[in-house]
Amino acid sequence: MQNLLNYDGVPAVKNGVIRQYTGDAPFSWVDGDDVAQAAALALLHPERHGGQTYRMGYDVKSYGEIAAMMTEELGQPFRYEAQDPQIFLDEMRATGAEMAYMSCVYDNFRRMAARDIPGVEEVFDNFPQIAGREPMRLRAFIRKHRDKLAY
């Protein structure tokens, strides 16, 4: 979910516009703070979490659906502009970024847009068993970070 706030220090939503490279594909979202809590609990309680694999993701939405949700929650118009993944790759090359890694990111964006990654729409109900509470949901995340998303 933190990718809605910024990516590599650059705001992800500018003046109500989300520009991303995944087309209209929906995929599963998780709050990085929930991931951090699960990791901390695994380190603090290896007897309970040792050897476990926790797949995490609790809301499935496309960027267009998230823009509509931001409009509802924040009372301002938001919209999503899908970008061709090639634009990302060209911009990264122009900035001198490490292209081995950026090519992997590009491939992920391209495959997401083509809906060619199995399992990206899966959701799980395991967080209460991991952390003893419900996970952060997208609507609550948007409200929590109103100051970073509103314009």
Image: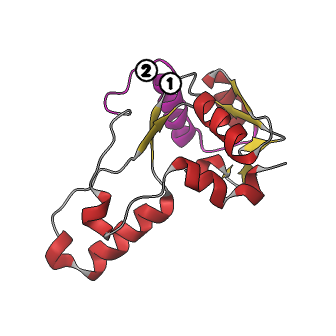
Return the mark for residue 1. Answer: none
Q: Amino acid at mark 1?
A: Ala
Residue 66 lies, with reference to residue 113, above or below; the image says: below
Q: Position of residue 151 (x, y in %)?
A: 85, 48
Q: Is residue 100 left or right of residue 66?
A: left
Direction from residue 49 to residue 104 in the image, left or right: right
Front-most of 32 and 144?
144
Q: Main secondary structure of the magenta part?
A: helix
Pick the residue in front: 50 or 94: 50
Q: Residue furthest top?
A: 114
Residue 7 seen in this snapshot: no
Query: On screen, 15 above or below 134?
Result: above
Marks 1 and 2, the one that precedes in the sequence: 1
- Residue corresponding to mark 1: 25
Q: What residue is shown with label 2?
A: 115
Q: Quadrant of residue 95?
A: top right
Q: Please name the residue shown 80% across and 40% down the image.
A: 76
Residue 105 in the magenta stretch? The answer is yes
Mark 1 touching mark 2, by CB under 8 A?
Answer: yes
Amino acid identity at mark 2: Arg
Q: Secondary structure at mark 2?
A: loop
Is 149 drawn above or below residue 76 in the view shown?
below
Colour mode? Answer: secondary structure
Residue 20 x %, y %: 65, 32
Instruction: Name the residue rendered at 80%, 42% in the picture.
Output: 14
Q: Position of residue 136 (x, y in %)?
A: 47, 57
What range is drawn magenta here? 95-119
Given residues 32 and 143, the one toward you in this image is 143
Number of numbered discs overlaid on the protein picture: 2
Residue 96 position within the rendered picture, expressed as x and y whole percent measured from the top left: 71, 42
- Is residue 23 or residue 61 the one in the foreground? 61
Mark 1, residues whose alpha carbon is within 10 Å: few (<14), some, or many (≥20)?
Answer: many
